[in-house]
Structures are given as C-alpha cells and as structure tokens.
Amino acid sequence: MALQISPKDTDLLLKQKNVLSRDVIDKYSYAGQITQTCLKYIISLINDSYHLNKHEKYSPAELCLLGDSYMQTLINQNFKKIEEKGIAQPVTLDINNILSGYSPELNDINNSYLQVGDIVTINLGCHIDGYTSNLAHTIVIYPNISNGSPGPLLGESSDAIIASYLATEAVITLLACSLTPEKIPNELIENGNKVVTGSMIRKLVNSIAQSYNCIVVPTSKVRRIRRFLAGQAEGVVAERDFKGVVWSEQDQEDELIKRASSGNGSTELTIIDSINGRKKLKENDIDNTIPSDEFIVKTGEVYSIDIKMSPINKEELGIVTLNVLNSELKPSIFIRDVSISEQLKLRNSRKLLSLVDKKQSVYPFKLSYVSENFPIKGEDLNNELNNIEKDVKTFKFGVGECINKQLFVNKAILSTKFIPLREILKTCTSTGINGYDASKASLPGLELPLPKLGVTSLKMKTLMKKSLDINVIREMSTIALSEDNGCIRLSGGKEFGVSYVHSEYELNEDVSNIIKQLSALREDERFGIKVVECGVL
C-alpha cells in the first residue's frame, strides 16, 4: 500500500520534523525514560511472583495488562498539551520459541503461567508526539530463590543470550562512532573509508553469532526510525527512504550456496533462480523501500537495534525461519489501516472502529486499550480487571468484520523454526518461484524466502510440518545520534544486564579484538565515546 503525499508534506514529515532539536530530544528522552521504568516494573512483578514468592503468580495476560496500564499512566503524566502520545508497542511476553506478538487478553484460553527454565523476552514501546522508544530484553525464569541460590543457565539458550547481548552492545558503540569516525576500529574499515556502513554492521553481528554457534534470526534489523515511522507497520505500509540492515532467510540461503560452491557443504545445491535477490529489485526502487546494506550512518539520525539470535546444530545444515501461529494462539494486537474507509454492518463493529479512531494512532493496539477502565487505576483492581475483560469480550464480536474489511490488520504471533536442508531440497520447484504469501507481512524485496533454491512462501508452509522448534533470544534498544548531545541511549543499558548464564563458547581472536576496542571506547569518557543512557523515572 502506498499513500499519496505532496513533495512539500514529504519534506516536512520526513525531514524537518526529524531534526534532533532540543524539543525533539526531550520527547525522545521522556519516551525512553517511560520504557525503562515500565520494563523495570514488569521485571519486579515477575521477580516478586516467580522468584521471591512475595505475590501469587501473575499470568502473562495479567503481566501484559498491568505493564500497559502502568506505561499509559506514565505517558499521561507529562506533555499534557500533546494529543498524539501513547503506547507504540504493547507489552508482549514472548516465551522460548515465540519470536514476537504474544500478548494475551485476560479471557484468552491459552493464558497459562510461566515455568522454571522459560526464556522470556519482554517487548514494549511508547511514543511522545510520534517520537518513539522501543525496547526488548530477555530474562530467564529461575527456580525459587528461597530454595537456595540458583546456578547459571547452561546449554544452547545461554549461547544465544550472550551472543545477542554482545551484538547489541557492539552495534550501539559502532553507531556512536559515526559521531567521531576517526575512532572506528581499523579492522572494520572498508576501502579506507572511515564511515559506519550497513555492511560493516552486518559483518560485526554475523561474526559474533558465528563465534557462539548461533544464527541471526530473520526480521532482525538495525534500522533508522523517524517520527511516526518506527517499524510498527512493516509489511502493511511501504516506508519511503528505508535505511537499515535487515536479516532474512535469503542471507542464510546465500551462505549455504557459498559453502556448497567452495566444497565445504555436504550437499550439492542446485540453483533454480540465480537473480541477485534484493539488489536486482533495487534498480527499479525509486522510493528506496527495499532494504540494502549500501548506506552510511549519519549524525542526527535515530536508530533501532533489534537483534534476535537462535542456537544452531553444527552437525545438520538447514534454515531458521518463522512460522505464523494461527491455530495455537490467536493474535491480540492490531494495526489500524488509516488509508481504508468502509461502511460496517454490525453495531459492535461500528462502536469498536469509532473508539479506535478516537483513542488510537498509527501504532499497534489491543482491544483492552479502548475500554473505559483502561488504564487501571488500582483502586479496585479485581473489579477493574473484570470490567476490562467484559469490554474485550464485547469488542471481539466486532473485530472480525473490521479485519475482513481490512480496516484492522492483526499482528501475527510468530515462532522460530529450524527446517533441515534435506527436507528443503525435496520441495524445490522450478515453477511458481515468484509466488508469495500475501497474508504474511514482509518488507519489500523479502517476500520470497529462498528465491535461488526455488522455495516459495507456500512451499515453506508445507515444510513447517517437518520443522523443529528452537528458542530465540531478543535484545532491542533505541539510540539517538545528536551532534550536540552525543549518543543518547533511550532504552536498555546498564540498568538491565545480561541474565546469569554460562556458555562453552567464546569470541574468536579477531572478533574479540574488535569487541575489546569498542568496549575500551565506551569506558574512556574523555578520549573515547560517551553514551548517555536514559534512566528510570
């Protein structure tokens, strides 16, 4: 979908409104403080109920609703003259192999409790006047502390936790180097040009993943964000002048073909379609909507670093991909497609649409957000929760028609899957290789998962029956690169360190030297790089 905007409005929305003035930085910073505070609040709820036994266990639905209410309350306390402010990313608790989107409502059937050993990623975000701060942080559910001090998490998941944490911190420091390019480590410089590029970012993240026997999961990205453009509608609206590094199945496909051609692969691969993927499409991409590594990080930009890692089996080649959970878990997060206007038949549908248009912006929302009892005030918690549950039950009668009329687009719940290469080779086809699944949201140029091997999106669906679940770890931060104020980290940081884990792997020597240089720059505030972190309110 493409919206028609005049050149004058385009310049205003995409350029003038994104200059990092003092007022804009204040809005970004307050959004960052809110996300930091909300994450700390949710972690405290989990600790009190699962680790310290101070409270009966909260279900994921209760944790999400309490987190959303707390975040909305903080948002309402400041910038009262600004009408467009609110939740940019509903609180989700993505457990083990679930990648994104799991935020159950109170009356959802699959609303169970967290278990010891679960890997839980907390994802949330807010915006002030369209200036967005998103974050994701992964924690581990340990045994009850009253039974003794728990040991570190071992195994494959610990490898991915360390890899995602190191990659996120390294990329943040590298992006901060764009303010003083002379401090970029020599090992990363390409063609003698002291600038931070997309290919430099990809190389750094991939090398860390390989050191810990992990793979960078598709939909991982390091991308520029702008006012009202924080990636919340990727796959729904094509974003003009997209700037960022995006990982997809095509990157894994290229690596498999490279290994096979060099004689290191155990299986000979037949290339069905030798097109150069995104690069060929890029030639006709006048609006620059297709992701490409050919860009330079510049001062005055804001970036979202969203790294997802999964452990892999060295003994078996394959592809790590994503599966949409339609039957097991029902989506509870929606996006309003403001370009579509339709007449609705059902009264519940008309009421729901009216409330959404009145209360919500272009960011994702949940049905509970338009309830009169949201956000929760805490005066009579049980009664407020029951009222919200009743409202959501009523809204569900109308949401179906809104989706069918394409007024709402649901954000799918995605899980991470590993498909063995031997199964992929059995399903390759030389016909229909350009067919893709229109119902699956994806960035332009990434609609086909494995174009060179002749595997379409529909073929990938059939392969899910022979796939294996694998855990996924996610770390996400937002930073602003200001010429006057330096690198401002809006979310994440020292307040939320890596979980207590132990890995048998370590960085190889070349990567270790780069990481040490980047770490030294962060530690030396006088001659190095200063990264200012937003604190907790």
Image (spheres, rainbow, N blue to C red):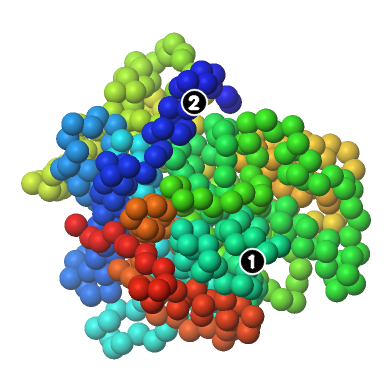
Left or right: residue 449 versus residue 483 is right
Q: Tell me if residue 401 can be seen.
A: no
Q: Dot 2, crowdedness within 10 Å: few (<14), some or many (≥20)?
A: few
Is residue 181 depicted above or below 379 in this figure? Answer: below
* Label of residue 189 in the image: 1
Amino acid under disc 2? Thr
Q: Tell me if residue 449 can be seen.
A: yes
Residue closest to the eye, 426 or 189: 189
Question: What is the x, y in percent for residue 90?
Answer: 36, 45
- Dot 2 corresponds to which residue? 10
Question: What is the x, y in percent for residue 189?
Answer: 64, 66
Please name the residue shown 58% across and 26% down the image: 1
Q: How many marks?
A: 2
Is residue 80 depicted above or below 30 in this figure? Answer: above
Is residue 109 depicted above or below 514 in this figure? Answer: above
Q: Residue furthest left?
A: 379
Q: Dot 1, crowdedness within 10 Å: few (<14), some or many (≥20)?
A: some
Quadrant where the C terminus is found in the figure:
bottom left
Residue closest to the eye, 481 or 275: 481
Tell me which numbered mark, 2 or 1, is placed earlier along the sequence.
2
Amino acid under disc 1? Ile
